[in-house]
Image (cartoon, helix red, strand yellow):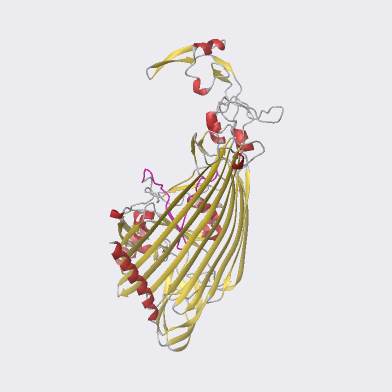
Amino acid sequence: MFNNLHKWRSIFICFSFIGLTFTGYSQANFSIKGFVKDINDVSLIGVNVVLQATPLGSITDIDGMYELKGNLPVGSYKIIFSYVGYGPKTEKVNLTAGNNDIMINAILDNDALALDEVIVTGSSLNAPKRQLGNAITSLKSADLEKSGTSNALTSLQGRVPGAKITQVSGDPAGAINISLRGVNSISGGSDPLYVIDGIIVSNSSEAVTQTGNPAGESQIGTPRLADINPNDIETINVINGAAAAAIYGSRASNGVVLITTKRGTSGKPKITVGTSFNINQLRKKVYITTYGKQFGFAALRLGNISNVTAATAAANPGTTTTPILRDGATANLPTNLVDVKRYDYQDQIFHTGIGTDNFINFTGGSEKTKYFAGVSYMNNQGIITNTNFSRIGIRLNIDQILTSWASLAVGINAVKSSAKDLPTGNVFWSPINGVNITNNIWDITERDANGNLKAVEPTRINPLSAIETFDMRQNVNRALSNVKLSLFPLEGLQIDLIAGMDAFSQVGTQFLPQYPYAGVNNAYYASGYASTANNISFLYNTDLNITYNKSFGDISSNTAVGYNYQNSRTDYTQSNGEFIAPGFTSVNGSPTRLTSYSLGQYWIDGLFAQQTFGYKNQLFITGAARVDNSSIFSKSQRNQVYTKASMSWVLSDSELWKNSGISNVLSAAKLRASYGEAGGVAAIGTI
């Protein structure tokens, strides 16, 4: 099977280059122009106008006017007008030898269900909504702007049906966990596959600051999609069904999030500037009792309240107990009450953070060359004192028409982000955990004569010690780049070759000084702790997609075949140590320094084929399959097959529906069904 896979790969590559030889002999120079309006005769601004099966396109100006110029082989073409909230319009145009000056106007009607809106379904695949039998949720740039968030994933909250999207920590970067299909693996994660402009990108984040946690499990914050500026995004399409695996293979078992960034438009240069100011506050505090009474005596710890010995009771006059039987053992429970003063530690741990998000975008170009360039800066304080996250990014997208049968798109995004963290999760030195496990009878703001914080409940850590003295910093440098070559050798035939790379480095430093009070459990690094960690991730993928569209009367056919290759490597190095010498704030001050290294790498390649048949643009049947081959799979099971099938029927477009009384009550209706198989590699691990 492995040899067959590589045989078919060679055939696909050869086929793509054979297509280059098919060009017309007779050429037509043309200028197509016109106006686009709605049914109320109002000019529409920003309508997309595309000459199908060519690299040519434009948008309407402030007067609703467009113009297409170029040189193409003689023949019949289709012009497609599309606009958000309106149904698309298709007009035919015949180009003859010589010069062609053609005027074509279009009137667009409202589209309540947006069934003809074109949705991105793969690295270079797309389809109208009416054709899709599986569930896809689509968000536009306007939806992201309304969310008012600086995190691209946060904008999905409440907008993806059936998805569980939660913020897992108070990290100022907004650490987000997305589960599109629920928990489907014991050891593997539930994170979907993320694709940006055809690049498969990583959302994983290694523990480069929260290292060495023997007394609990930390929550790794700042997933790497926090590096993406939402102001650069044009659309987000979420495929949350198993059908995604038939296109993207083993890594898509948890669904796929397809992100498309903004592109340039022809016309005069346009500058867009945006700035925002935000205030971050704790939405609601956890209820904590401040009732001024406690059983037993004031110094009695919560963990020992059910087991007061006779000696302890005698050492604290006035203590009375009653025996209780639990799990076959008898323990003494105090029954007397004493006066105590209680505090709400949340008042000292949480504060109001402020943030700002700024960007400036440049767009413009000619009919053949279009560009989008953007610079952004974001800084966000966390709701916990002394935490913050900042990001600066530069993006450049260029679209170039090479010939009448070829176009090239290039994109690059450089990002630098910095974060100041504090321990999170189930670690006992986490400020949040300090609220949960420390009896709130201690004044955590109290200091000694030298200005140092005083101890709280024996063996515990004063929550303010972590906020005031811990130094945990993370810096990330990231580059995402993509190149897409599109060929149009024959009418209805399109060949796309895509190459993308996602490379980033995480550098983290951590310093926990000795506590200025005695009695802290040694598991909480009472003698001090420091570490430095470096995580280097490199992921690249290449895609070859071939699509062919053909109509036979009332029957339409869309055929797509493709090959995908992914390669990932992650190098992680860490050095840590305890017993930090006075005057040192790094691991260099430790006499017990330990260094470790780990390597994770894998490759995946696969072939897929998808066929869709349509009848009268109302009924659609789709079948697809992908064969995956991966270094993660065992040699005996190296090839895995994923299939899908779907059906979509736009009932409201049928004559029976239109002629019945139902159309007076229900104006639009669509019936869909889908089936898919999926299998993930996340639970297997890398080698």
Total tally of numbered discs in the picture: 0
196 falls in the magenta region: yes
Using the image as rendered, state which of residue 284 and residue 38 is in the foreground: 284
Left or right of 471 in this view: 83? left
Using the rendered image of the protein, determine whether residue 368 is visible from the camera's viewpoint. Answer: yes
Q: Residue 244, image x and y in percent? A: 36, 57
Q: Which range of residues does the magenta coloring cover?
A: 185-209
Residue extending furthest bottom?
98
Q: Is residue 474 left or right of residue 176?
A: right
Q: Position of residue 650 (x, y in %)?
A: 33, 62
Q: Is residue 12 magenta?
A: no
Magenta highlight: main SS: loop
* Residue 661 showing in the rendered view: no
Instruction: Work out whether 325 lies above or below 208.
Output: above
x and y, in percent, of residue 223 in the image: 50, 49
**Residue 631 in which image quadrant:** bottom left
In the image as oriented, which residue stretches furthest toward the right? 449
Observer-nearest of 15 and 598: 598
94 vs 516, nearest the viewer: 516
Q: Residue at x 58, y 71 (%)?
A: 364
Where's the N terminus, which quadrant? bottom left
Query: In this view of the protein, which residue sits in the foreground, 31 or 251?
Result: 251
Q: Give percent across and percent down for residue 419.
A: 59, 48
